[in-house]
Each structure stands twice: as C-alpha cells, then as structure tokens.
C-alpha cells in the first residue's frame, strides 16, 4: 500500500533532512552535558549557543532573549503563568481570545482557579479579533494580554502589531503564541511589538519535545522550571541538546528558504481549494480570505460529517476534522463555535494544511479522493 498524502502540517511536520544531519553528532558522539566544565561539555555548549543565535535571527532579537523549552506548551505556560505570578501585586486581570489553542486557554482557566480574572474576547465570522474589543476589555487590573499570532484551525492571522501598540501604551505585557506562524509568515518581534513569543519546534520541521520562548529584555516572568539554573537561570533542566540543535537549524533553513516555501505552500493550498470548489458546490472556506497562513485551508461541506469523510479518505489522505460526531452528539471545535459557523456547516469541517514538501501530484490525488468521499458521504446521508 502506498503511503497516504500528508496534508496535516499544522498538526506536526516531518524532520527536515538538514535538521537531522545537524542533530546526528549530538545523538551519536557529542553526548556531554553542556554544563560540564571539562572537554566533553565544550561542543554541546557551543552548539546550544549557535542554536540560540539561529532562533534569535528568525525573530530579530538578541540571543540572550531566547530560552529553550520542551515545546510550545511549556513556552506558553512559562509566559502566561510566569507573568501572572510576577505581576500579581499590580493586578489580576488577563485578556485573551475565544479561539486560542488549549495550551493558552487551559492555562488561563487554571489561573482563574487561582484568583485571576480572565476576559475571553470574541472574534468575528472570519476568526479575527478586533483591536478595539481588546482595548475595551482592559481594566486598571489588567497585567497581561495573550493573543495567538495565527490560528491553528482556520489560519487567520491576528492583528498582533496593533494589539501590541494598545498594550504598550497602557504598560501591559503582551504575549503571542506563534507556534503556527514561525517559518510561514514574518515573525520579527520588533515589528510585532510583543514582549513574549512562543515557538514549537515540531511545527517547523524540527523534532518534537523542543521549543523556545522569546522574553524581551527587561521583562521578568517568574521562573517556571526550578532546578540547577540552566538557560541563564531562567529555565532549569539539563538541555535537550539534539533537539535544541535541530530547532536552531530548522530556523536557519526556514529563514533561508522562506520565500520559496511560502509560495509553494500557498500555490498547493490554492490549487486544493480550486479543485474542491470545481467538484463540489456545497462548500465554504473558513477563516479570513486574505489575512491567513499560506498553507492552511479549513473547508466545510454542508450537511456532511467530518469524521465520516476522514474515515473514507484516511488510507489515502491525512487531514484533520473541525468537528467530531458521536451518535447523536456533534462536538464542534471551539474555534468554529466562536466564529458562529452554523452547525450544518461546522459538523462537516476538514482542515487541510500543506507543507514545503507538498507537490502538485499530492494535490491532484487529494482533490480526486476527497471528491469521491464526499459523493459517497452525501449518498449515505440521503439514504438515511
């Protein structure tokens, strides 16, 4: 059986071959602890310093403003909980949106059970949050605003620069979860104006289990991981040297090939949309039509069930559902609910996400297989 076409790059990415090559010496030979003062610690320590500079370059910040973590989830936890704890003497109010990843929304919920107040700002039908709505949510107690750079389900890019200006004028710390955006769109922290930014390695062709957090100089969220004082005393734990090296290399490659990769992802995504639109009339695209990641396509098929479509295409196409249907119960994603997508559309939502290795043949196959599955699903729905 041939391997299915992979169109779920927002879920995770394969390791880039250059990333794997860069990691190999630190898996095979250079096993030393980077904190060791002897010979075996030298190469690992240098490798971490190099990776820190590579990550800093893609964000346009100082290497000293980057700390390595176990992934995007830890970076978000460190940024949000660390900031809340360090500023609780100033206030207890946090602002976020209704469409954040659970690695942000569940952290905010956790803080609510520990005396903090959280405002979840609504988004419009395109998944876009209004800067004025964020501004209206600010109170004298507001100490942190956290808004994702781009949505993982529908790809909508949020107005981070404008929100940063609002936060900056009020002296409020601003964090963005950039797990989906690094390597796909510009992530220059000086242009964005953010104080904190989270990266997840496995979303940009680096390994799972590694991430980074940008902490603007002068910002001091409380330490989240306590221990021996690695990462300039900001994040304890013996460093995951192969993972860190991989993340650094992935950022270097992403920066070098940015224009080529972005154009390819957009071309294949647009071809997929066009093919589906030509073959199926009851289809709607979700997310902002222009302010959107170049690789993300969330589409809803009216009256059909997403998990039924995925079952049908599963051996040939890998994609994600925007809704899960269990007997009479339909679980629609919180993102689609926040966007106000009607149930008869929402329950038939599929997210396709292309990658830098997606080609025209992949798209042709995805279109034909998906259209066949839609015809079969529609036939079953009619017969019911």
Image (cartoon, rainbow, N blue to C red):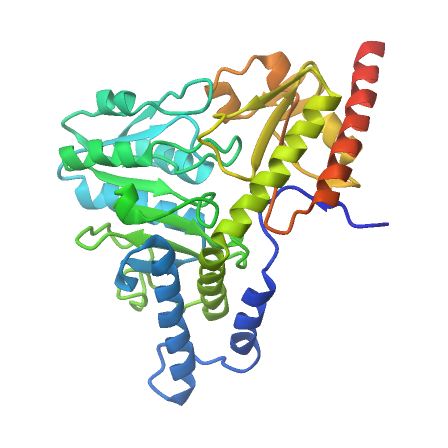
Of residues 362 and 174, the one nearer the viewer is 362
Residue 303 in view, yes or no: yes
In the rendered image, residue 256, in percent from the top left (x then y), is placed at: 47, 59
Residue 353 in view, yes or no: no
What number of labels is visible? 0
Against 209, is 109 above or below? Answer: above
Against 78, is 317 above or below? Answer: above
Residue at left offset 24%, top offset 22%: 137
Q: In which quarter of the image is the C terminus?
A: top right
Q: Farthest residue in the bottom direction?
A: 39
In the rendered image, residue 5, in percent from the top left (x then y), is placed at: 73, 45
Tell whether 73 sits left or right of 133: right
Residue at left offset 46%, top offset 20%: 338
Residue at left offset 41%, top offset 50%: 199
Of residues 137 and 91, the one nearer the viewer is 137
Tell whether 265 sits left or right of 146: right
Residue 60 position by quadrant? bottom left
Against 293, is 77 above or below? Answer: below
Of residues 343 and 129, the one nearer the viewer is 129
Against 221, is 99 above or below? Answer: above
In the rendered image, residue 366, in percent from the top left (x then y), is placed at: 74, 37
Residue 160 position by quadrant? top left
Tell whether 322 sits left or right of 111: right
In the rendered image, residue 340, in percent from the top left (x then y), is placed at: 49, 15
């Amino acid at each position: 059986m041939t391997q299915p076409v992979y169109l779920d790059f927002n879920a995770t990415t394969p390791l880039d071959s250059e990333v794997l090559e860069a990691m190999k010496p630190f898996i095979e030979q250079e096993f030393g602890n980077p904190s060791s003062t002897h010979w075996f610690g030298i190469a690992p320590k240098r490798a971490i310093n190099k990776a820190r500079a590579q990550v800093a370059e893609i964000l346009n910040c100082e290497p000293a403003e980057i700390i390595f973590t176990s992934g995007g989830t830890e970076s978000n936890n460190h940024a949000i909980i660390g900031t809340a704890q360090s500023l609780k003497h100033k206030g207890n109010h946090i602002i976020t949106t209704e469409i954040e990843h659970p690695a942000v929304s569940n952290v905010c919920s956790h803080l609510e059970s520990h005396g903090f107040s959280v405002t979840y700002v609504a988004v419009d039908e395109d998944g876009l949050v209004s800067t004025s709505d964020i501004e209206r949510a600010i109170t004298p107690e507001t100490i942190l605003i956290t808004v994702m750079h781009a949505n993982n389900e529908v790809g909508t890019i949020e107005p981070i620069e404008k929100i940063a200006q609002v936060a900056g004028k009020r002296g409020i710390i601003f964090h963005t979860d950039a797990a989906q955006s690094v390597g796909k769109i510009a992530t220059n922290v000086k242009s964005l104006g953010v104080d904190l930014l989270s990266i997840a390695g496995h979303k940009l062709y680096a390994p799972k289990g590694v991430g980074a957090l940008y902490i603007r100089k002068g910002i001091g969220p409380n330490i989240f991981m306590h221990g021996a004082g690695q990462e300039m005393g900001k994040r304890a734990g013996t460093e995951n040297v192969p993972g860190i090296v991989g993340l650094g290399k992935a950022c270097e490659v992403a920066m070098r090939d940015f224009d080529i990769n972005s154009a390819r992802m957009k071309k294949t995504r647009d071809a997929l949309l066009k093919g589906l639109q030509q073959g199926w009339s009851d289809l709607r695209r979700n997310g902002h039509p222009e302010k959107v990641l170049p690789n993300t396509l969330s589409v809803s098929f009216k009256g059909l069930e997403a998990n039924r479509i995925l079952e049908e295409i599963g051996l040939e196409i890998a994609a994600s559902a925007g809704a899960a249907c269990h007997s009479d119960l339909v679980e629609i994603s919180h993102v689609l609910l926040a966007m106000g997508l009607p149930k008869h559309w929402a329950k038939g939502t599929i997210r396709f996400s292309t990658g830098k290795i997606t080609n025209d043949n992949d798209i042709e196959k995805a279109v034909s297989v998906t259209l066949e599955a839609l015809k079969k699903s529609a036939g079953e729905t009619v017969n019911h």
